[in-house]
Image (spheres, grey):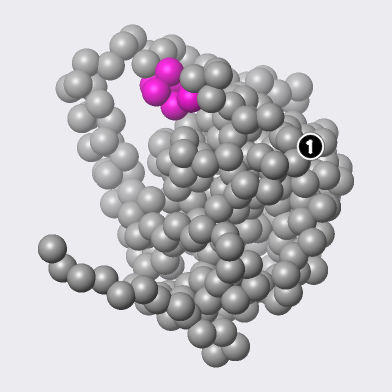
Amino acid sequence: MFSASQQEIKLAIAETTDISKRRGMAAQVSEKLPLQYASNSIPFNASDETRRSFMPPSDSFHPLTPDKMADFVFVTAASSNHFNEVVDAVASIQTLMPRKQIYFFDIGLNADQIAKTTLREKSAVFWVDASFRLRKNPDMSDAYRVARTNGGFVMFHSSGHSNFAVTHPDMYRYLSTDVNAQKNITQFGGGMLLVYRTEKVFRDILWWWVRCAQDADCFVPHYNPACRFQDRYKQFANCHRFDQSAINIIMSNIWLRDNRKLYTADRSFFWVIRDITRMYTIKTCQTTSV
């Protein structure tokens, strides 16, 4: 979906950093991802002001009560070349969950940024990408169980390969982990995520995901999304999955290797289809110019 080169991404991040410095950010404070594994990671630099602007007020976090858990909105985004696919995805939600709100963002934001933006307004966000299709009215009970267990972050879609196979080694310099253990951990897709506005989600998951996304050397150490698999678990496939690799490292560290019951839920209510199904009809509203 993205055509920018690694150098272009790094230049864009550098420009953003320069703008922040010109605005007089507070002194930088180095911090490392607090893991019980390797301690030799490169620390991220973040000011107190940055953390304060990221974290919502403590009284704005929502408890994982039944009413709040059911109060999620769907969020998606797409570039122009995936527009017809995302229309199909939206139509499937309109057909099978007609009472749910749907937010659409242009591709200028990354998935983690979109989730953070929308979570400031809503109890929960169900992020879906253009390949998501509802196949039936979902029973969300398993997803709610997972969210209650781990504090509010649910993944769904297994990729069929390990974290290790699709993660460039330089990412481990920032997100330290037991690298050998990553060979045995199935990577789950970032295309479907149910995320709740809880303190744990912001403090232990989203903060580190965003910090990596803001540093090109962490997020894009290797710009090659095309994998050459041999052993899908034990061998590096000479590719990198960006935000998906990062969130899987973070989640596997928090939940002590591959304890899927703590962060993954039933996926029987949707398909992953990288095409237009024409099974659903989009519902639109009339707009008038002012």
Name the side, left or right, on which 248 lies relative to 51. Answer: right
State which quarter of the image contains the C terminus.
bottom left
Towards the viewer: 229 or 252: 252
Residue 264 on image: x %, y %? 78, 50
Q: Is residue 213 above or below residue 238?
A: above
The stretch in magenta equals 50-56
Which is nearer the eye, 231 or 268?
268
Q: Is residue 287 above or below residue 197?
A: below
The residue at 46%/44% (across/down) is 118
Residue 31 visible in the shown view: yes
Query: What amino acid type should be assigned to the residue bearing mark 1?
Result: Arg
**Is 178 located above or below residue 138 in the figure?**
above
**Residue 90's spot in the image, x, y percent?**
51, 71
Q: Residue at x 58, y 63 (%)?
A: 99
Q: Position of residue 261 (x, y in %)?
A: 86, 46
Q: Examine the structure image and report whether residue 187 is included in the region drawn in magenta.
A: no
Q: Is residue 45 left or right of residue 18?
A: right
Quadrant position of residue 54: top left
* Residue depicted at x 45% and y 20%: 51
Indicate whether 13 appears above or below 79. above
Question: Which residue is denoted by mark 1 in the rendering?
Answer: 148
Left or right of residue 30: residue 28: left
